[in-house]
Image: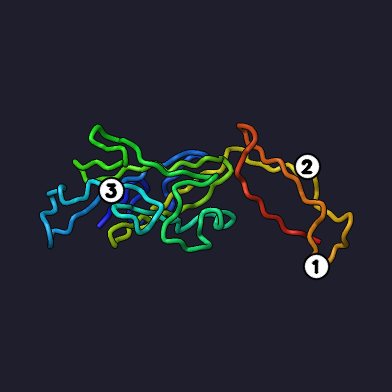
Amino acid sequence: DMEVTGDGGDGSLYDTEIEAGGFIDIDLRMVLDSAFVNASDLSHIPQCLYLAQDFYAPCGLTYVFRNAPFTYHQILGLTDDPLAAGLGSDFHTIFPVQKTASTNAQGFDPTTGTMHFRFQFLKSGIYGNFGLQFSGFGVKTRIFTFRVKPPPGLRLEVIQDPGYTITRAMTGNLFDVQPKLRVLSDSGPVNGLIVTYEVVP
């Protein structure tokens, strides 16, 4: 089995919060089945473990997004239902961290049977509720959940209203004049925010 820690734990849902553009550390502990081996003998755990992009990679552990704000579903792969998510995008990255002296370059500590990862957001405009699930060797973890807080003072300024100059305003027509927005916060411009809008007559 695999136990995931770093969020609020079993029974919690998006209780752990991080700042916009921040990171969260994730630990995966390999749990041996005492019906087959001595569960305290961690030498039975493969030393070659690493975080992979390929679900079928030997020794590879993978993850997928199980929840994210709707406007980011396609970017993060929720519309494709992949077996494994990528290790990075324009919006995020996930990588091993050496939390202890005995942790190797792939993030595995053989003295505890634990993998250590850091999930990092690269843009401050992506926020909301997120859920990740890890898998490997035929087992899956519970869904690891956390919430990213919006940047303090998040606000939109309309630079240009949408409109029609060439085409007529008819159902199905696209605006030939697209809206332009400036996304700001108390700390300055915000990058990475995907905005949707509704035309109100």
- Identify the residue shown where x is 62% and y is 46%: 193
State the image quarter where residue 190 is shown.
Answer: top right
- Identify the residue shown where x is 31% and y is 57%: 136
- Identify the residue shown where x is 29% and y is 61%: 139
Q: CA distance from mark 3 to mark 2?
A: 50 Å
Which residue, given by chain and number where applicable, does mark 1 sit on?
171
| Callout 3 touching callout 2 (CB < 8 Å) | no
- Amino acid on which the number 3 mark rests in the picture: Leu
Q: CA distance from mark 2 to mark 1?
A: 25 Å
Which residue, given by chain and number where applicable, does mark 3 sit on?
49
For label 2, the crowd category at 10 Å Cα-Cα, with few meaning under 14, some 14 to 19 and many 20 or more, is few
Which residue, given by chain and number where applicable, does mark 2 sit on?
159
| For marks 3 and 2 on the same chain, the one whose residue lies earlier in the sequence | 3
| Callout 1 touching callout 3 (CB < 8 Å) | no
For label 3, the crowd category at 10 Å Cα-Cα, with few meaning under 14, some 14 to 19 and many 20 or more, is many
Left or right side of 136 for 32: left
- Of badges 3 and 2, the one in the foreground is 3
Q: Quadrant of the image for the C terminus?
A: bottom right
* Residue at the limit of the structure toward the left, as seen here: 38
Q: Is residue 179 visible?
A: yes
Q: Colour scheme of this structure image?
A: rainbow
